Amino acid sequence: MSKIDHAMHQLQSLEMLANEDRWMNRLHPSVKLFITIFYIVFVVSFSKYQLAGLLAMAIYPAALFIIGELSFKDALHRLRIVLPVVCMVGIINPFLDRNVAITLFGIGISGGVLSMLSLMVKGVLAVLASYLLIATTSIEKICYALRQAHVPKILVSEVLLIYRYLTVLLSEARRVVTAYSLRAPGQKGIAVNAWGSLAGQMLLRSMDRAERVYQSMCLRGFRGEFYPAHQGKMRGTDWLWFLFWTLLLVALRYGNVTELIGKLFV
Amino acid sequence: MNDNRMNDNRMNDNRMIDVDHLNFAYDQAGLILSDICFHAEKGETIGLIGANGAGKSTFLRLLVGLDLNYEGEIRIAGELLGKKTLEHIRSKTGYVFQDSDSQLFMTTVAEDVAFAPRNYGLSEDEVKRRVDKALAEVHIEHLRDKSIYKLSGGEKKRAAIATILSMNPEVILMDEPSAALDPKNRRNLIHLINELKGTRIIASHDLDFIKDTCTRTVLLSEGKIIFDGPSLEVLRNRELLEAHDLELPLSLMHVITHTHDGSTHTHMFIHE
């Protein structure tokens, strides 16, 4: 399978995952979106030396992987490019802040190392929370939730169209690359002198295809706003989920829960 | 032109599409459609045939207002096509693209079929009813929650048709519907089109497909209507078809191949 095929397959399998009929998938999208945003804001708001408190926030993705019956291994595979990039943030901090901040088992740990680790954990947790949202909620439902939150319709339409055109772009790229490789047997990758024309071809073909998709939408009454299926009112389980996570996240952020747990063992 | 209806401009209650003296050009290079006069009655199924570049697809695109820079008049159900009426006309006109991938863009089949009814502001109950009905009409109820990426070519074509049926269109326009379909799916599509209601115009190179679905056929060549009349009349007219770069439908041909004096001969006859 080529890289493009693989990318398309990943995109499709993520969509299918989001459309599965599971408990987590059936939760109201507004609740899932709100909790995710809430979680990311809380995670990011930890100070750079509060690593212990930050680690306790991992309970949210951990619980969702279990309740949502999602594979952590698949998630790591899908995020294999994003996660290392996120982990690179703050990599120079140990060189900038060398003052010892804490001593653990007789080993001094500098503030730079702590802040680097804290940035890494923040990034990983935020990415995992976003992944959990899109793995359990289709793009249409996320857009519905965004509209419910009064996000301007132009922005929501942009999100949905960009997402749709990803597939268009990938499928056109696959055709162009397949046509090239069939006439360049044994060649690894694409020769540099062909990059310009191939990129141009791909752009023109993608635009052409995108135009047809847009025409098809207009012919079916599209007037600049998507109308995803109405998700109905929030049910009791949605409210319970919302309250449970809101309270727990507030407790983890402001209640110094890690210190209380630590005291239990001291 | 062999049909008097070409010059008949009188409005008729039974008339669904009225095209009068239509001229269209993309640029100064020349007319793509020249002085087209065409009328379609309610419930008619009309084939639009012609070689590549004859103007079939352009004609269909103009009927749904995908380009409004034309001269002449187009009326759908008595309503003059223009910027003000575009939305209303499109609400009763379904257009099936040649490439189903351009038509299907939502996540699942049901979501795609529901796209138009939701855009027209129907209630969620009515949307569900329309989706169920459209899926049943094209016999793909079992594909309701299937991802559009997982559909075969024939299923995609049916789903594409369902996406326009959910609009309850009075006019259905199809551009090369049989393209890229295998024989079984092609045969199924013929049955399906014959079951559909409303005025249907089918643009195709596939003359056998036209023969099996359309009672009336319009032959376009270099942007002009050359013939407009009963399908069998034009589809049996070998001279006329060959003069406009088309060939007799295979189902109307009887081919005999034999060898004598060391050489092979092929003779073609038209089925009576």
Image: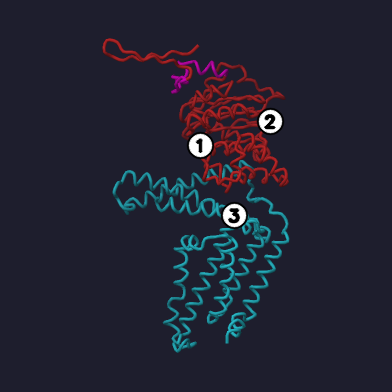
Chain colours: A cyan, B red
Q: Which residue is mark 2?
A: B77
Looking at the image, residue B17 lies above or below residue A106: above
Rounded to the nearest angstrom, the CA distance separating label 2 from label 1 is 27 Å
Q: Are marks 3 and 2 on the same chain?
A: no
Q: Amino acid at mark 1?
A: Tyr
Q: Residue at horizontal 34%, vertical 50%?
A: A194
Q: Earlier in the sequence, mark 2 or mark 1?
A: 1
Q: Secondary structure at mark 2?
A: loop
Give the residues in magenta.
B229-250
Residue farthest front in this picture: A265
List x then y, in percent, for residue A118.
51, 77
Q: Amino acid at mark 3?
A: Ser
* Residue A93 relative to residue B157: left or right: left
Chain letter of the residue carrying label 1 = B
Looking at the image, residue B182 lies above or below residue B257: below
Chain letter of the residue carrying label 2 = B
Residue B231 lies within the magenta run: yes
Q: Are marks 2 and 1 on the same chain?
A: yes
Q: Quadrant of residue A42?
A: bottom right
Q: Which residue is mark 1?
A: B26
Q: Residue at horizontal 36%, vertical 52%?
A: A195
Q: Secondary structure at mark 1?
A: loop
Residue A138's tag is: 3
Residue A126 lies within the magenta run: no
* Labels 3 & 2 near each other (Cβ < 8 A): no
Dot 3 crowding, Cα within 10 Å, few <14, some 14–19, many 20+: many
List x then y, in percent, for residue A160.
58, 54
